[in-house]
Image (tube, rainbow, N blue to C red):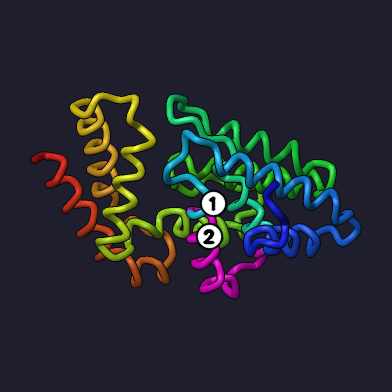
Amino acid sequence: MLLINSDLGNRFALHLSAINSDIEPAKVNALWQDIAVRYNETQRAYHTLSHLQQLFEQFEQIKRELSEPHIIALALYYHDVIYEPTRADNELKSAEYAAEALGHYLSAEQCQYIYALIMMTANHQLDKLANPDKSNDAAYLLDMDLSILGASWPEYEHYAKVIRQEYMHVPLADYRIGRMAVLNGLLAHPRLYLTNYYYEQLEAQARDNIKLEVNLLLC
């Protein structure tokens, strides 16, 4: 059984309890166990607990910029809770799952916000929020999710390889076409990162990494 005294489990308990101090530890543990089991599913190679760990390394660097860090943290935990590479509705299913799982412990407004945040990870564009003041937090969440693009080349190269592992059901020729379409779509954006912090830190490296992967896919 996966234990809650892991780093990610402790973080989950901290963030959820900060919003609802009345929630019983056993309930928190059950929610975390369910998340951990799902992120350990065999069809995953990139969208795993290691992905969450990398995101929370980023979170520690920018959490002071967030107005609602605990909500953003919960959105990170649930943004890939449902992941099946053969499906195109993983963000929707993850958003629905998060709203259902947290609905007993958070307000309806908080659940709707987490739902909206997770849905934004489908296209990594800021969608209209009920409260425009929340857009800064949403931008940081989206940039954290794309932070791997601006990692060192060895880290990025590993990321590219495990993404391919998740799509082993797709023939290599078809995968190359689809992956290049995704990468070239990213390069077409005026900027990959929405916040100045991530733009200044990672934009140049991310574009270099993506261009290199595109060139490798052409070989």
What distance separates the C-alpha of mark 2 from that of mark 1? 6 Å
Which element is circle 1 on?
helix
Report the side of 163 relative to 209 (left or right).
Answer: right
Q: Which residues are magenta?
A: 51-69
Q: Quadrant of residue 41?
A: top right
Q: Which secondary structure dominates the residues rendered in magenta?
A: helix
Task: Give yes or no for residue 88 being in the magenta stretch.
Answer: no
Question: Could you say which is closer to the camera, residue 159 or residue 190?
Answer: 159
- Residue sitting at x 61%, y 43%: 116
Quadrant of the image for the C terminus? top left
Type of amino acid at the residue the image marks with label 2: Gln
Report the side of 140 relative to 22 (left or right).
Answer: left
- Residue sitting at x 26%, y 37%: 179
* Residue 53 numbered tag: 2
* Residue 158 numbered tag: none
Q: Decide: few, some or many residues near mark 1? Use Cα within 10 Å; few <14, some 14-19, many ≥20.
A: some
Residue 54 in percent (x, y) is at: 48, 61
Q: Quadrant of residue 67?
A: bottom right
Residue 173 in percent (x, y) is at: 18, 27
View extreme (left): residue:
219
- Residue sitting at x 47%, y 33%: 43
Task: Give yes or no for residue 57 being in the magenta stretch.
Answer: yes
View extreme (front): residue:
1
Which element is circle 2 on?
helix
Number of dots carrying numbers? 2
Residue 44 in percent (x, y) is at: 47, 39
Q: Are marks 2 and 1 in contact (CB under 8 Å)?
A: yes
Question: Could you say which is closer to the camera, residue 96 or residue 6?
Answer: 6
Q: Decide: few, some or many residues near mark 2? Use Cα within 10 Å; few <14, some 14-19, many ≥20.
A: some
Q: Is residue 36 above or below residue 82?
A: below
Residue identified by numbered label 1: 49
Type of amino acid at the residue the image marks with label 1: Leu
